[in-house]
Amino acid sequence: MIDTILTIAAVLIMIAIFLSAYRFIIGPDLVDRVISFDVIGVASIALITIITHFANRMIYLDIAIVYGLLSFLGVIIIARYLEKGL
Amino acid sequence: MEIIEIIGAFTTLIGSIFILLGSVGMVRMPDFYNRIQTGTKASTLGTMLSLLGIGLIHLDWGGKIVVLILFVLMTNPVSSHVIARAAHFTKISLTGKTVVDKLTKKKFKLKKDN
């Protein structure tokens, strides 16, 4: 029962990632693409955590930490580039 | 199968529903500022609930789960604030239904929608 509920949750997060990727494709400006990239990164952290439950390995949580750190740094660097140049 | 694991699984399901609603708002909203509102807040709450649910299922992973929840809670509002500030300084246009903008002196007229 727990595995069934977590599979439904993983499918819902995948649908969310595809909707954000649609906004990533049709976004009229650069900042729309940046914020959809941020939403994809944060949803991927939850998806990696559910995959960690299925694989039953605690070491995969470190991948989620590094993924969130890289997503945060990417958004900060693009915002600074937009504001005053690198 | 204990009762706390079922509670954790339903918490993860509620979190994924929040993430899905945030992404639907990313597609539907008319403006960049509305998109940033619905995208980052809903996805932050949904990710924190999903991590909390997995932490309730596996109680021995609690340390790293707490580190991840604090990390998401600290970094995601900062990044959304920074990108909204950059968007306002690069003059991304507002939608036509805007009523007030406190950062500029420009006056908006109230339109009467039917």
Image (tube, grey):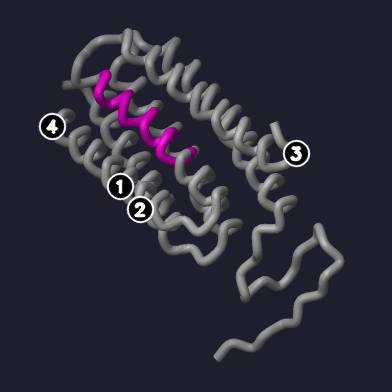
Label 3 secondary element: helix
Q: Select label 2 or label 3 by which is in front.
A: 3
**Which of the labelled discs sits on residue A18, or is there none?**
1
Left or right, residue B47 beside residue B41: left
- Circle 2 residue: A22
- Circle 4 residue: A1
Q: Identity of the amino acid at label 3?
A: Lys
User: Picture quarter containing residue B54?
Assistant: top left
Q: Are marks 4 and 3 on the same chain?
A: yes
**Which of the labelled discs sits on residue B18, or is there none?**
none
Q: Residue at x 31, y 9 (%)?
A: A58
Q: Which of disc 2 and disc 4 is earlier in sequence?
A: 4
Q: Identity of the amino acid at label 4?
A: Met
Label 2 secondary element: helix
Left or right, residue B45 beside residue A49: right
Closest to the observer: A46 or B2?
Answer: A46
SS majority, magenta: helix
**Which of the labelled discs sits on residue A84, or is there none?**
3
Spatial distance from mark 4 to mark 2, Cα to Cα?
A: 32 Å
